[in-house]
Amino acid sequence: MNKSISLFISVIISLSALSQNVVITGKAANQVNKLVRVIVYSDQFSMFEHTIAQTRTNNMGEFTMKLDVEKTQFAYLAFELDKGEFYLSPGGKYNFTINNDTTIVSGSIFDRLPLNFTLNADDGGIVQTIGDFNMDYNDFVYNNITSIYKSRDKSTVMKFITDMKEKYTKNNLEYVNNYVEYSLVSLLWLSRKENNNQILENYIINKPVLYYNIQYTAFFKDFFKNYFASEKLYTNSELVYAINNPDNKVLSYLLLQYEQTTADNRVSEIVEMLLLSRNYYNRDVIKEEVITKLNNIVSNSSYSKNRLIAANFISVLKEMQSGSHAPKFTLVDSNMDTISLDNFNGKFVLLSFVKDNCKICNFHMQLLSDIKKQNQGAFEIVTIVAGSNLKDVINLKKENGFDWPILKLDENILLLEDYNIVAYPSYIFVNPDGTIAYAHLPMPDENMELYLQRFMDQYNKQ
């Protein structure tokens, strides 16, 4: 065969192995023009969510999405703001039937149940096998608490592990095999059949890092969260010093004498990122140093996936933090005029997120009006209403002479995710330069005014 033709064919084969077409179809009866998305984690250590496909239901409540997928991975099907879990594989075909009762929700977003659906997956058996294994695993844990956690005799645990390997790993499903493997490793660890150092040596250090396997990453994070505390390798003051000192790489400083933990640069880098992210909100830690150290990994790591993880951790940690940019929006008000956040450049803005049928929200609007008058218009108010019925809120505005815009969220529901709104009402204060002053302020009857004045004073003194 001609060498150039052979090379061309090999390139085509390698490219096709990178990603394969996936077809997702489904139906939600009587749910017209609803947003449907497929969400994955950009990486499964930082858990930074990323939408890879989206569409809307047609007039029959049906939807179809086509996308390219490179690796089997944990995913969500999101219907409006409700999400349900599944596993997405290259070349798979998935058909969802969404039950209506999951889309009829009262109360806050926080009260929502996971999306309830029936899934028919043509994916080589991955979804079905993981589902069957999870049922066996959960049943065993539920029925054998004493054997797992208290008994010195681990024969019951070891028999279960042997049975599960025989039942679920005799196949060509690499993702499933690794999923089962690290579920069972977790059981070995929780039952103390193997100690921390044995787990490190046998399953983590100098072993492949399974970046895409949700069970591996979940075990990895749980293990190291407990490892440092149980081994008592450093004190909290030593950890704070290591993070706050610009000259230190945190893990190497803390664990220089523990060669086993730092023997695998790829793993130790991930562990360092987990330590940094978990301590970002430690009152003694300098947040800027956490971000600087993560940025160093973004710039200098030898591992491309670790660079991605570090960048994602930065995004997760800085999201909706004071000083971060407030998510932009353009919405329609009660007069059908278009209003955006940019309309308020140069002004402090109190964003008020309410629900159309929220009685306490209506009560708060009067309190907000009083606070604004007392501050002589030092800030603007913008109320964003979730729900299809604006009538009551608009009437309340007219009856009380509220002098701020009432905006309809309408189909822009992702704005609630952008602002991390999980309950109504919620309040966000935005600086004149469009950055967040404070997210999720206290209620108007819980000293909100003191917070507003403090943040305006801080900004004006800069």
Image (tube, rainbow, N blue to C red):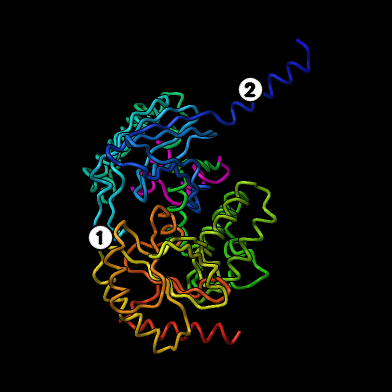
For discs 1 and 2, the disc positioned in front in the rendered view: 1
Front in this rendered view, residue 296 or 142 = 296
Give the camera-side residue of 266 and 70: 70
The residue lying at 52 percent from left, 41 percent from top is 210
Given residues 346 and 12, the one toward you in this image is 346
The residue at the far right in this view is 3
> Does 389 sit left or right of 69 as displayed?
left
**Picture quarter with the C terminus:** bottom right
Return the mark for residue 92. none
Sequence order check, earlier mark of 1 and 2: 2
Question: In the drawing, what numbered circle is on residue 107?
Answer: 1
Up/down of 106 relative to 147, above or below:
below
- Amino acid type at circle 1 is Gly
Residue to which mark 2 is pinned? 13
Q: Where's residue 35, x and y in %?
A: 40, 45
Residue 308, above or below 171: below
Looking at the image, the residue that sits furthest to the top is 1
| The magenta segment | 180-208
Predominant SS of the magenta segment: helix
- Indicate the amino acid at tag 2: Ile
Q: Is residue 4 left or right of residue 396?
A: right
Left or right: where 232 falls relative to 298: left
